[in-house]
Image (spheres, helix red, strand yellow):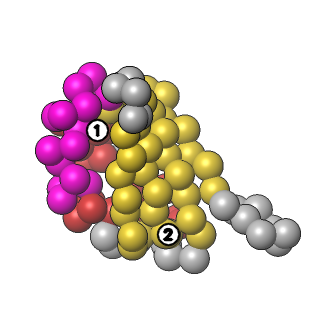
Amino acid sequence: MAKFIATHAVADVARWKSFDAERTAAFAPFATDVTSYTDPNGGKTVALTVNVHDISGMQAFMQTPSAAALMEKHGVLQPVTFLTAYTNGPHV
């Protein structure tokens, strides 16, 4: 399992936050422990952390029209940057 962090800006933070349950459900087939973060200074940059157990499934999902529609609905602004955690082992 790999921990990923995704960061991006949003059009409206309150709107993005209102979809936490939907975001968690969208990632459920390939990830657990979906946690959302906002800028404590009020900026429009947000982040997610997820523990991914199906990396290829997540990568495939992120390329689908369904994922694009969810991101648009949630107010996600491109680019989305993914980072992964590692511990002295192979990088994902």
- Amino acid found under the numbered disc labelled 1: Met
54 in magenta:
no
Dominant SS of magenta comes to: helix
Label 1's element? helix
Q: Does the magenta stretch include residue 20?
A: yes
Q: For mark 2, does the 10 Å Cα neighbourhood hold few (<14), some (14 to 19), or many (20 or more) residues?
A: many
Instruction: Using the image as rendered, state which of residue 18 and residue 82 is in the foreground.
Output: 18
Residue 55 percent across, percent down from the top left: 53, 66
**Which image quadrant: the C terminus?**
bottom right
User: From which residue to which does the magenta span run?
Assistant: 10-23
The disc at residue 52 is 2
Under circle 2, the secondary element is: strand
Which quadrant would residue 87 be assigned to in this image? bottom right
Residue 11, x across and y down, in percent: 27, 23
Cβ–Cβ below 8 Å for labels 1 and 2? no
Kindly tell me whether residue 65 is visible in this rendering.
Answer: no
Q: Residue at x 39, y 46 (%)?
A: 37
| Image side of residue 18 versus residue 6, left or right | left
How crowded pointer 1 is (Cα within 10 Å; few <14, some 14-19, many 20+) is rated as some
Which residue is painted at 45% across and 62% down in the image? 50
Q: In which quarter of the image is residue 16?
A: top left
Amino acid type at circle 2 is Val
Badge number at residue 9:
none
Q: Along the horizontal axis of the image, is 71 left or right of 80?
A: left
Location of mark 1 (residue): 71
In terms of image quadrants, where is residue 75? top left
The image shows residue 49 at horizontal and vertical percentages of 46, 57
Asked if residue 92 lies left or right of residue 65, the reply is right
The one of 23 and 58 positioned closer to us in this rendering: 23
Residue 28, can we see it? yes
CA–CA distance in space, label 1 to label 2 = 19 Å
